[in-house]
Image: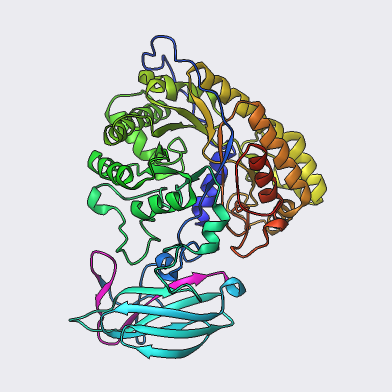
Amino acid sequence: MKRVALLVALAAAGALLVRGLGGASGGATGAPPPGPKATPRLGINLSSPADWSTELPFTDLFRSARGWISQKDGAPFGAGPKLVLDAHGWITRLEPGGWAETVLSSGLGPHLPSGDYTLVYEGQGELELWGARTTVKQRAPGRLVIALEAPGENIFLRLRATSPTDPVRKIRVYLPGLADTRAPSGPWHPAFLARWKGMAVVRFMDFQQTNGSKLRHLGDRPTPDDATFAEKGVPVEWLVDLANRLGADPWFCMPHEADDEYVRGFAEIVKARLDPARRAWIEYSNEVWNGQFPQHGYAVQMGRKLGLGKDDSTAGLRYTSRRSREIFAIWERAFGGATRLRRALAVQAANAEAATELVRFEDGYRRADALAIAPYFGLVPTPAGAPGGEQPRAAELHGLSVEQLLDRVEGTALPIALGRMKDARRVAERHGLLLVAYEAGQHLVGVTGAENDDALTALFAAANQHPRMGALYQRYLEAWTQAGGDLLCHFSSVGRNSKWGNWGLLEYFDDDPRRSPKLMALLSWARSLGQTVNGPR
């Protein structure tokens, strides 16, 4: 999580510019179609399904549990023998003197609900919760009810024993009051559904664990039978179910190495299950232009192999354009056309030249609907020893008050973001595309190179909680509308403030939304556009 957040921070701030595009744009011909009319709307990026998540999207805590940790009597932590797992991640046997455990929740502390946790499973074995004061209230074959009081920083589930002929599997750890699988909310926490009801689009980039994904073939994809979704992401069946329940359009990110069969099978599941009133947004991976993500290296390698460019930047960008359109074509065949699709070509907000190359290569704009950017505003201090640029040195920010910092954001960072919106709009308009934001929002990140900077981290967190941040969001959102922007997906939903960024609209799932100036500004903007969104006014 920390690494990914930092990469997103550096990339979206414009630390990496695509250079050396060189030459014509792959033979663009003819005039583009007339541009569609923008309809600004608010969408959201959901946080990763992980034990460290502070969102609690599921009724079952095990769905976001960490992978099994092997332990052995007398050995250091995590130094047990290699575990034997079945296809869905369940342990098939334990060695003598060994056991396994997983982290169900880390970092929630007092935010993790106290009360009766219902643990159900199939098979025969011995399970226990630890990391908090617990009392077993009920015990029956395949079922435990455990009262959890005063949760600690981390909550673990330990598998002490499992039958080699009937191993423990299908473990579910239901939060207090949420053990009824027949409830109207299904597998989703009711508060999670209520929080994001009314979002126009839900982007599943982190929910699918897109960055660095190892999914290639259809058989690799996550399924509802998997032990946890933390490694591969949430399965498509659940993603569609969530979109249907929220009344939102889903935004899917196809893994960068996924073959055509994977894409086809995924698209067919969406077609069969998605509410006919909904459209599906499609994107090839996430930030393939960003040199710090594995998907960028893959695109460069493939672009070089196919002879698409004489330098890495050109080869990677052109491969992204071509592979995106191949994926779009597969979805079009699955859906019988593009009417219910929104096909997005995504590029760095700071580089209009790269945007032009992306959409014009092989007339890519003719097979797409939207140019997608992430027009963040904020500050990412330039590391010591690095060349200077538009970002300040950390020393320039030390000692500033919150008001002084926000003065700087308003006076320098915000105008830069607004200029990038206008530049991208011109590219989109010239090619008949909508301008959308796949990610958006403030961008204050307190990491400076390899060093931690606790003072900046605290300053940036305070700025995010200051009422004036809401006013900056209002200006930012109004500018997006004035620039001709369409959909804007905020990054992100719920997450703790840290040196890696202050991305969440809320830090914890149970925070009072009225205390988040960012969320309140976004809700106000959405309502001004006619969206019916939940939350206080």
Q: Position of residue 125 (x, y in %)?
A: 29, 85
Q: Of all residues shown, which one is farthest toward the left?
A: 165
- Return the residue nearer the eye: 186 or 125: 186
User: Compared to 175, does 220 lie above or below?
Assistant: above
Image location (x, y in percent) of residue 170: 31, 72
The structure residue drawn at horizontal position 24% and vertical position 47%, both measured from the top left corner, is: 217
Residue 455 at x, y = what percent? Answer: 72, 57
Vertical side of 434 occupied by 295: above or below: below
Is any atom of residue 83 visible in this view?
A: no
Question: Would residue 309 be visible to someone looking at this image?
Answer: yes
Q: Is residue 226 magenta?
A: no
Q: Magenta stretch: give its range.
A: 85-108
Horizontal side of residue 513 vs 440, given as left or right: right
Report the colour scheme.
Answer: rainbow
Q: Is residue 96 above or below residue 235?
A: below
Which residue appears at 67% of the width and 34% of the height? 390
Q: Along the line of sight, which residue is nearer the eye, 101 or 490?
A: 490
Residue shown at 44% from the left, 18% from the top: 22
Residue 67 vertical position relative to residue 16 in the rendered view, above or below? below
* Horizontal side, residue 424 vs residue 521: left or right: left
Asked where in the image residue 365 lies, by quadrant, the reply is top left
Residue 107 magenta-highlighted = yes
Image position, residue 128 (x, y; %): 40, 84
